């Protein structure tokens, strides 16, 4: 009996020592220094930060501790509305190229969109993984990709917004790199993650621009890495070692604006993107905004109401809502973001101001012909209604119909 107790005691002691060593060693191993450079207004020499403040992205969405949040995410034990196990998708097979100023956009799922124009094939945050997380864990995909990987046309340009698993999918990027050798543009630090897996990319800071040309000829066109409001991490301990961003691709006939993954912050960043030229198409996130009942946004994610504000501030002619309905990342029901967006657009008065402007959900896998930018013509006798403020918009959305959306 005494021998058994000694063995148990030694075993427990060894376990305690191993856990202590793991607590000391593992975080340092996982805390990679992805980028080294001089300090700036959003880099302190070690980590990046939002110059408009980080307090809204630092805490757990909805409050509480990290362990409890992860447990609720894994088990769905917070009373969240049920999601379907799967949603039918009819995949499409895009054309090899779209020439001239015609523009075709196909939502593949989550933040992955194929945009084709000027002979160039652009792919945003390509994720084909079944789960959005490390080591095969994380939320499971409920919608198949709207374009099968093997049916993707040759990709010229990949816009990679940051390093979260639902946006940076190394397996997909490795397949794309082996197949097409696309130009991959990403904000500072994320290139180190890709390089460790044999993937070359071009990293840039906010405000920096890079040329890109379609493989079929034409161009060159310019990609500018632009500010948004988010954070980055692969393992938790490497928080904000790599930067996050939105992008503007400057094109004849109107620019492409990819907002990436973002909260509202100071709300000035969509206007900064608009200063680079008129935006023909904006890709704006609307989902993963609710982590407790009734929440309309979180520090890291805009909801549909703030997405309308981004649409208005960007001056975009057309916008496609993304970042919803593919992976269950938060509290709201699967179709709540799209239904709430329709209500927010009605409340915003956008249709009264410019009937040619459109911000509406699209079907995964269905190619959308993006109209050109119509000239602004204001008849002298038409009175344009005043724009609603964010507070006015929320008051307009305070209806039984919207409150019923969980």
Image (cartoon, rainbow, N blue to C red):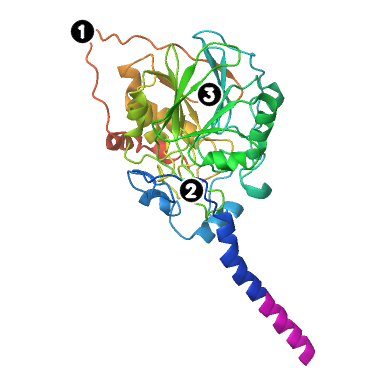
How far apart, in angstroms, are the residues tagged by discs 2 and 3?
Answer: 34 Å
SS type, badge 1: loop
The residue identified by callout 1 is: 380
Task: Please tell me which residue is depicted at 45% across the width and 36% down the height of the picture.
Answer: 245
Residue 304, image x, y percentages: 42, 34
Crowding at label 3, few (<14), some or many (≥20) Cα neighbours within 10 Å? some
The image quadrant that residue 379 belongs to is: top left
The residue identified by callout 3 is: 362
The residue identified by callout 2 is: 241
User: In the picture, which quadrant includes the N terminus?
Assistant: bottom right
The image quadrant that residue 392 belongs to is: top left
If you read the primary sequence from the N terminus, does the residue marked by circle 2 or circle 3 appear first? 2
If you read the primary sequence from the N terminus, does the residue marked by circle 1 or circle 3 appear first? 3
SS type, badge 2: loop
Q: Main secondary structure of the magenta part?
A: helix
The image quadrant that residue 390 belongs to is: top left
With respect to residue 331, does 371 lie above or below? Answer: above
Query: Nearer the observer, disc 2 or disc 3?
Result: 2
Q: State the extent of the magenta-drawn residues as a range.
A: 1-14
Residue 350, image x, y percentages: 34, 22
For residue 378, say whether it is visible. yes
If you read the primary sequence from the N terminus, does the residue marked by circle 1 or circle 2 appear first? 2
SS type, badge 3: loop
């Amino acid at each position: 009996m005494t021998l058994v107790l000694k063995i148990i005691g030694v075993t427990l002691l060894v376990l305690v020592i191993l856990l202590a060593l793991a607590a000391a060693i593992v975080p340092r191993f996982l805390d990679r220094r992805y980028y080294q450079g001089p300090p700036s207004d959003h880099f302190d020499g070690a980590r990046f930060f939002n110059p408009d403040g980080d307090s809204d992205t630092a805490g757990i969405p909805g409050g509480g501790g990290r362990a409890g949040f992860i447990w609720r995410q894994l088990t769905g034990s917070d009373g969240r509305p049920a999601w379907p196990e799967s949603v039918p998708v009819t995949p499409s097979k895009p054309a090899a190229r779209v020439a001239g100023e015609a523009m075709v956009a196909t939502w593949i799922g989550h933040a992955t969109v194929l945009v084709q124009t000027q002979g160039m094939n652009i792919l945003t945050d390509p994720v084909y993984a079944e789960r959005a997380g490390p080591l095969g864990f994380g939320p499971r995909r409920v919608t198949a990709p709207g374009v099968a990987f093997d049916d993707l046309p040759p990709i010229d340009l990949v816009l990679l917004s940051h390093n979260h698993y639902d946006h940076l999918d190394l397996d997909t990027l490795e397949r794309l790199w082996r197949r097409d050798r696309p130009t991959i543009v990403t904000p500072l630090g994320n290139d180190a993650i890709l390089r460790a897996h044999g993937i070359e990319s071009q990293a840039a800071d906010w405000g920096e621009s890079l040329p890109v040309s379609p493989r079929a000829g034409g161009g060159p066109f310019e990609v500018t890495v632009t500010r948004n409001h988010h954070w980055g991490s692969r393992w938790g301990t490497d928080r904000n070692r790599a930067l996050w961003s939105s992008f503007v691709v400057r094109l004849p006939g109107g620019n492409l604006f990819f907002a990436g993954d973002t909260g509202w912050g100071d709300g000035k960043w969509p206007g900064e993107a608009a200063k680079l030229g008129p935006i023909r198409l904006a890709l704006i996130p609307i989902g993963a905004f609710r982590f407790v009942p009734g929440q309309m946004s979180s520090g890291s994610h805009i909801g549909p109401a703030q997405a309308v504000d981004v649409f208005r501030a960007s001056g975009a002619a057309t916008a496609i809502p993304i970042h919803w309905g593919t992976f269950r990342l938060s509290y709201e029901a699967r179709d709540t973001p799209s239904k709430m967006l329709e209500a927010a657009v009605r409340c915003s008065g956008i249709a009264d101001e410019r009937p040619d402007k459109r911000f509406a959900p699209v079907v995964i896998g269905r190619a959308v012909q993006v109209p050109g930018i119509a000239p602004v013509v204001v008849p002298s006798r038409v009175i344009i209604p005043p724009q609603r403020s964010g507070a006015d918009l929320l008051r307009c959305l305070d209806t039984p119909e919207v409150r019923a959306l969980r």
